[in-house]
């Protein structure tokens, strides 16, 4: 009995019969390569070597911008917004030449990839020819998207030159979002329709499909982004849409660790993690995976592997359903927290009279709420302090509420904590707010100011 594409089987009489739809769909794997894995020519060659091993598989590959390109593009947006268009143009030219030097190490002179990359940059250059747009977030997305677009062009061209046939897919042809720029929310139904119209035919052609993380489009065809570090999420969207066998994100760490190795020394790798555990840890700042990544995978029971691009043979971590293992203490630290203590000016009870109004405004600003507590006349909320969102929120409520604002705080979340681990973490810090629930403790802390003896006496 022979097996054809999509699992059709031939019986002894030579007649073909289709297998269950499910087995047909379970043929795609989704891989995501982030900035660190694409930071220079050697890194890109290493990615190609990893992909060589999967030559026979049907892969959808999602790439983000190379290295720290997105940070550099943010500076372009900032300069343009302040009216320094010469600086903006110079910064963009630097980014362009950094990409060209990577290409010089990967391609023959005159390769058609150069023209494609040049054309892609032109779109952002046009934005700089216009005066700064009044909607900063809109302008940001139109410029910053170029990082993913050029990375995907370069990697696709390189894989094809290496004998790995790869089709380039514009993620904006598939992922439809609302028009909240820089934090677009996926419109799932339309996205599923767009995927069904375009991608199955591409999957039928030989080779891989490669697309961009982080970007989507509005109904009016303007580019949106899904939030910083959003390429993991894009890979999860494509995994969901293609009902993938599995998704793998290739990182510079051996897997998910008990804490960020950039901050802590004695960390250990977790072999297995449940979706729930992964959602909790990433939501509260474990930066190894974008928090929105897990849910689409959980909804279709697609396992997520976190593996090392430095050691592709390592087992990594698998995130899936119902992991029973007891977990060790796990720590996530989120920087740039703002704590607002909001109290009514007229002594009305905050929970009874105002809570829905406050929550609506929090949702309008897309503030991520990490912790909250309320008393009779006040409501304290700890949020990620991004740009001027907090100030915009306060400006909206100031008339009715008094707000005490503390910024530059840290949120420390410890799951499966022990008192010893907790005391080690918060020693020498001022605890501004604390919450304990079963097995989890969260504290919002501020560093103790260093007081010199001269000032004390
Ligand atoms: P990408 O290249 O895909 O953008 P990131 O740099 O966003 O990758 O994510 C990998 C980084 O996440 C690691 O280098 C590590 O410092 C950090 N990190 C934070 N928390 C954890 C954790 N619990 N386990 C592993 N890595 C973590
Ligand atoms: N390039 C984007 C960023 O740096 C998206 C990502 O890397 O996931 O935020
Ligand atoms: Mg990242």
Image (cartoon, rainbow, N blue to C red):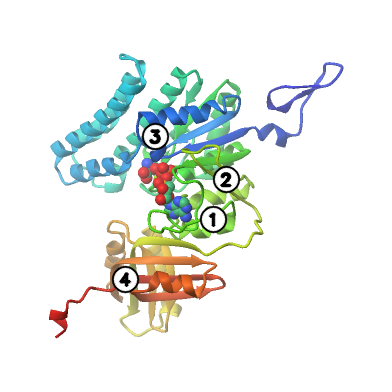
Q: Is residue 445 visible?
A: yes
Disc 2 and disc 4: Cα gap in Å? Answer: 35 Å
Q: Residue at x 28, y 62 (%)?
A: 392
Q: Residues within 10 Å of mark 3 (few under 14, many from 20)?
A: many
As helix, strand or loop, the secondary structure at mark 3 comes to helix
The quadrant of the rendering that contains the C terminus is: bottom left
Q: Ligand 1: does it lie within 8 Å of the C-beta at label 4? A: no
- Residue at mark 2 to residue at mark 3: CA–CA distance: 21 Å
Q: Position of residue 196 (x, y in %)?
A: 58, 32
Residue at left offset 55%, top offset 67%: 416
Q: Earlier in the sequence, mark 4 or mark 3?
A: 3
- Mark sitting on residue 38: 3
Residue under pointer 1: 278
Residue 386 position within the rendered picture, expressed as x and y whole percent measured from the top left:
32, 57
Quadrant location of residue 285? bottom left
Residue 298 pos. (x, y %): 60, 50
Mark 1 or mark 3: name the one nearer the start of the chain: 3
Name the residue located 28 percent from the left edge and 25 percent from the top edge.
100
Disc 4 secondary structure class: strand
In primary-sequence order, the first of circles 2 and 4 is 2
Q: Earlier in the sequence, mark 1 or mark 4?
A: 1
Neighbour class for label 2 at 10 Å: few (<14), some, many (≥20)?
many
The reply to whether the C-beta atoms of the residues labelled 4 and 3 are less than 8 Å apart is no
Q: Quadrant of residue 142?
A: top left
Q: How many marks?
A: 4
C-alpha separation, residue under disc 4 versus residue under disc 3: 36 Å
Q: Which mark is residue 304?
A: 2
Residue sticking out furthest to the right: 13
């Amino acid at each position: 009995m022979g097996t054809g594409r999509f699992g059709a089987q031939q019986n002894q009489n030579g007649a073909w019969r289709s297998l269950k739809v499910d087995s047909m769909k379970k043929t795609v794997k989704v891989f995501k390569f982030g900035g660190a894995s694409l930071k220079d020519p050697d890194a890109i060659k290493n990615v190609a070597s990893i992909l060589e091993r999967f030559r026979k598989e049907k892969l959808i590959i999602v790439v983000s911008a190379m290295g720290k390109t997105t940070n550099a593009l943010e500076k372009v947006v900032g300069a343009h917004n302040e009216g320094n268009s010469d600086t903006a143009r110079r910064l963009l030219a630097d980014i362009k030449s950094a990409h060209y030097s990577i290409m010089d190490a990967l391609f023959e002179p005159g390769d058609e990839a150069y023209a494609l990359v040049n054309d892609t940059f032109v779109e952002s250059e046009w934005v700089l020819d216009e005066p700064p747009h009044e909607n900063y977030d809109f302008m940001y997305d139109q410029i910053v998207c170029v990082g993913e677009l050029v990375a995907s062009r370069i990697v696709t061209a390189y894989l094809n030159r290496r004998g790995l046939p790869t089709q380039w897919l514009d993620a904006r042809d598939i992922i439809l979002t609302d028009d909240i720029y820089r934090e677009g929310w996926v419109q799932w139904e339309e996205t599923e329709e767009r995927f069904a119209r375009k991608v199955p035919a591409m999957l039928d052609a030989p080779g891989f499909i490669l697309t961009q993380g982080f970007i989507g489009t509005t109904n009016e065809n303007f580019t949106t982004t899904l939030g910083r570090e959003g390429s993991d999420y894009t890979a999860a969207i494509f995994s969901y849409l293609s009902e993938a066998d599995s998704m793998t994100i290739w990182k510079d760490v051996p897997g998910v660790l008990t804490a960020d190795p950039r901050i802590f020394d004695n960390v250990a790798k977790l072999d297995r993690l449940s979706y729930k555990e992964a959602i909790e840890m990433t939501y509260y700042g474990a930066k190894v995976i974008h928090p929105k990544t897990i849910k689409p995978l959980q909804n279709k029971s697609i396992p997520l592997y976190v593996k090392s691009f430095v050691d592709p043979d390592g087992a990594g971590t698998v995130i899936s359903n119902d992991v029973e293992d007891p977990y060790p203490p796990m720590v996530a630290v989120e920087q740039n927290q703002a704590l607002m203590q909001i109290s009514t000016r007229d002594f009305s009870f905050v929970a009874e009279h105002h809570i829905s109004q406050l929550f609506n405004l929090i949702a309008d600003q897309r503030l991520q709420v990490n912790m909250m507590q309320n008393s009779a006349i006040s409501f304290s909320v700890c949020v990620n302090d991004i740009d001027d969102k907090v100030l915009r929120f306060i400006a909206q409520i100031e008339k009715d509420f008094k707000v005490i604002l503390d910024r530059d705080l840290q949120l420390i979340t410890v799951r499966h904590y022990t008192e010893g681990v907790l005391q080690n973490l918060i020693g020498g810090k001022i605890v501004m707010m604390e919450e304990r629930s079963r097995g989890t403790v969260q504290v919002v802390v501020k560093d103790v100011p260093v007081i010199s003896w001269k000032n004390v006496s």
